[in-house]
Image (tube, helix red, strand yellow):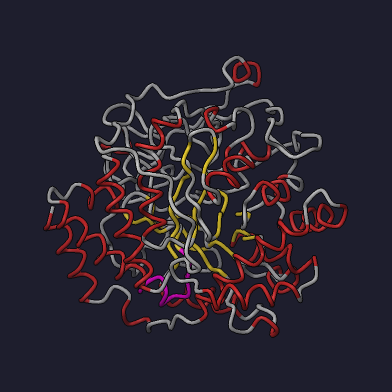
Amino acid sequence: MTGHHGRVLRVSALIVAGSLVLVACGGSPSPSADALTGTASSGGSFVLSEDDRSASPTVQSPSPTVPTSESTAADPTTTSSAAPVPVSTSSPAPTPAAPAATNGLVTAADQAAAAAAVAAMSVEDRAGTVVMASSADAVGSDLVQRRHLGGVILMGSQGTIDGTSAGTPAQVAAVTAALQAQVPAGQAGAPLLVATDQEYGLVTRMVNGFTDFPGADELGDITDTAAAVAATEAVTTAAGRELRAVGVNVDFAPDADIAPRSGASGVAGRTFGSDPDRVGELVGAAVRGYSAGGVAPTIKHFPGIGRLAADTHVALPQLDSSCEEWNAAEAVPFRDGVAAGAPLVMTGHIRWPAAGASELPTSLSRTVLTDLVHGSGTGGCQGLDFGGVAVSDSFEMAPVVEAYGKNEAPWRGIAAGQDLVLMPVDPDGAVDGIVAAANDGRLPAERLTEAATRVYALRLALGRVPAPSLDVVDSAEHQATAAQARSAG
C-alpha cells in the first residue's frame, strides 16, 4: 500500500527504467450487486497516491499520466498484458477446515478479553478502534487521543518518517512513543497498532540507521528452496526485532502476490517469485519470522494482484482468473500465510468477476471479504476461513474514493467485512461516518462490534510482546544475517 508520501526505494537503474507510469482512473464505478444498499457518490476530488515504486533518493520516476475521464470510461476494466501466472502442478487444496481459536499471535484469551472490552465501549470508541490513520494526520496532533483510534501507519519520504528530521532509529522511536502516550488509560495493555510498509528491497520505509536486509525478490532468487526458507525466516526475524525496537508492531509485509513469468506486474520486484507453491513456502517462512521478531505480519494483496500490470493506487484493474485458476495459483500463498499464523490479511483494490466483484473493488466487496477472506468460500472459490484482522489497502486510493465519498467509503468497507480501514482521506470524517451509519442501522451493530473486537484482540496480543533495545538495530549480528542471506543466493 501507499499514501501521499513516497517510499524510499533501493532501486537499481534497470528497475527504475522499467517502472510503470501511473494512470489515473476517471469516472465513478456503479455499486455492484454485493454492495450494501445506498447511493454511491463520486466523493469529489482525491489526492493521487504515489506509487510504491515511485520515489528514490537518487532517481526520479516518470510523472503520472492522467487521462481524461472520457478515455478512461472507454476502457473501465484495464487488464494486464502479462503472461498468465503459472498454475501449481499439485492438486488444488481442499476447502480449509474451520479456524482454530487462536490466530498466530492472538490467543483465545485475547479474543475473550477483547470481546469484554469492546462490549463496554461507546459506539464512538468502537468506530475509532477500526480506523488506522496516516502519520501525516496523526503525528503532532491529538487525533489518536481524541478519536481513540486503533492504529497509525508511519509514512514518510526518502527515509524521513513523519515527525522526524532524518528517520533515524531514535527519532522513529520517539515518534511511536508519543503516539502510544495518547492511548486512553482505560486501554492499558492494548497498545496502538503502529504499522509501516517495510518489505525491504524495493519497498522500504526505514533506511537511515537500519539494517539493509534483502527483500522478497532477492530471497526468492535463492535456488535451493530449503535454503531460501531458512534465509527468509532468519531475515524476517531480525527485521521484526528492529521494527519492534523502534515501536513498530505491525508490518504490512510480506507480499503474497505471485509474479507472472513474463510481462509487466504492478508489484514487480516485490514478490518471492512465480511458482505458487514455492511462494507459499516463503510467505509462510516470512510470517513465522516477523512474528518471532515481535511484529504482526500482514499478507497482501488479497486476492492477488501479481499478474496485473496496472497500478491499483490510481486504477481499478480486473483479475480475469476463474475460481479454479485462482484456487490453484493466487490463493496458495494466502492459504500458506494463514496456516503459518498471519494475524492480518490486506485486501487490494481490483475487480474480480469470478468472485462477484465486477464493479466495486474487492476491498469494498462483501463477497470477497465476508465469504472468501473470513468465510469458507463462494462460487467455487475456496475461502481462507481467516479469523484475524482484514485490513484494507489505503482508502486514499482512487478506486475507493471514486466508488463512494471519503466519509462513506470507510463505513461501507467495515460493513462489507473489513476490520481495519487504512488511511481514510479524513480520519475524523471516517469515524463520524462509521458512527452515523452504526446509529441509523446502515452498518449493523454486530459487524462493527466484530471488527473492533478483532482489532482490539490483536492489540492485546501485541501488548504482551517485549521490545528489544535500540542496540539491535543495524547491529553486527543483523548485518551478518543480511550478508549470509545474500551469499546463499
> Which residue shows up at 66% across the image and 65% down it?
452
User: Quadrant of the rendered structure where residue 15 is?
Assistant: top left
On the image, the x and y values in percent for residue 453 come to 64, 67
Q: Is residue 140 left or right of residue 335?
A: right
Q: Residue at x 62, y 81 (%)?
A: 181
| Residue 102 forms part of the magenta stretch | no
Horizontal and vertical percent for residue 313? 54, 39
196 is higher (above) or lower (below) than 397: below
Q: Position of residue 30 (x, y in %)?
A: 71, 27
- In the depicted structure, whether residue 33 falls above or below residue 111: above
Q: Is residue 477 above or below residue 253?
A: below
Q: In which quadrant of the rendered view does residue 266 lie?
A: top left
Looking at the image, residue 264 sits to the left or right of residue 146; the answer is left
Instruction: Name the spot of residue 22 as percent of width and height, x first.
Output: 49, 32
Question: Would you say 92 lies left or right of 150 here?
Answer: left
Which residue is farthest right?
440
Residue closest to the eye, 11 or 444 = 444
Q: Which residues are magenta?
A: 241-250
Instruction: Find out whether residue 243 is within the magenta segment.
Output: yes
Please tell me which residue is depicted at 63% across the width and 40% down the height of the picture: 365
- Which residue is painted at 67% across and 61% down in the image? 450
Q: Is residue 390 above or below residue 369?
A: below
